[in-house]
Amino acid sequence: MYFKKLGHILFFMMMMCFSVVSNAETVWIDVRSAVEHSIDNIEGDARISHDDIVAGVSEIFPDKNTDIRLYCRSGNRAGKAILALKDAGYTNVSNAGGINDARRERGLN
């Protein structure tokens, strides 16, 4: 529990710094597990488990019009997370598919 809260605090601080730089940029979020993220990740992207997506995003990005792109391994969990965010009122969320799709879309291959 302590480490989860510490992780949220550190993530919040990182994302606050990011949002000060530019509110117009797309926010990329990896919704995979911490273990999956530790094995392979895109540097600089946030990681919020799909199970915690609404709490994590609303804490850091209260603006429901924030441009948010989600990805996981295949796009399945990202799709579930999008439904949860839309139910919470977020209007500009989309599924980038899997992590490799997110890399290709951004020219990071």
Image (tube, rainbow, N blue to C red):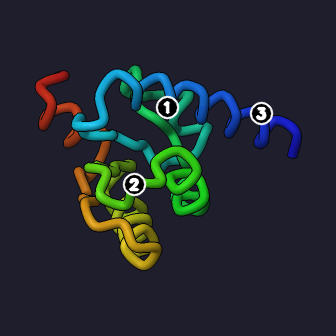
Indicate the amino acid at tag 3.
Leu
Tell me, for residue 6, which label it has, or none.
3
**Which callout, 2 or 3, points to the residue nearer the camera?**
2
Indicate the amino acid at tag 1.
Met
In which quarter of the view is residue 43 placed? top left
In this view, the residue farthest toward the bottom is 87
- In the rendered image of this protein, does residue 37 appear above or below residue 77? above
Location of mark 1 (residue): 15
Name the one closer to the observer, 49 or 13: 13
- In the rendered image of this protein, does residue 37 appear above or below residue 55? above
In this view, the residue farthest toward the right is 2
Answer with left or right where residue 50 lies relative to residue 69. Answer: right
* C-alpha span from label 2 to label 1: 13 Å
SS at badge 3: helix
- x, y (%) of residue 39? 51, 28
- x, y (%) of residue 87? 42, 79
SS at badge 1: helix
- In the rendered image of this protein, does residue 100 appear above or below residue 59? above
**Which callout, 1 or 3, points to the residue nearer the camera?**
1
Location of mark 2 (residue): 63
Which class describes the residues within 10 Å of circle 2: few (<14), some (14-19), or many (20+)?
A: some
- x, y (%) of residue 42? 37, 26
Which class describes the residues within 10 Å of circle 1: few (<14), some (14-19), or many (20+)?
A: some
Answer with left or right where residue 93 lies relative to residue 3. Answer: left
Indicate the amino acid at tag 2.
Asp
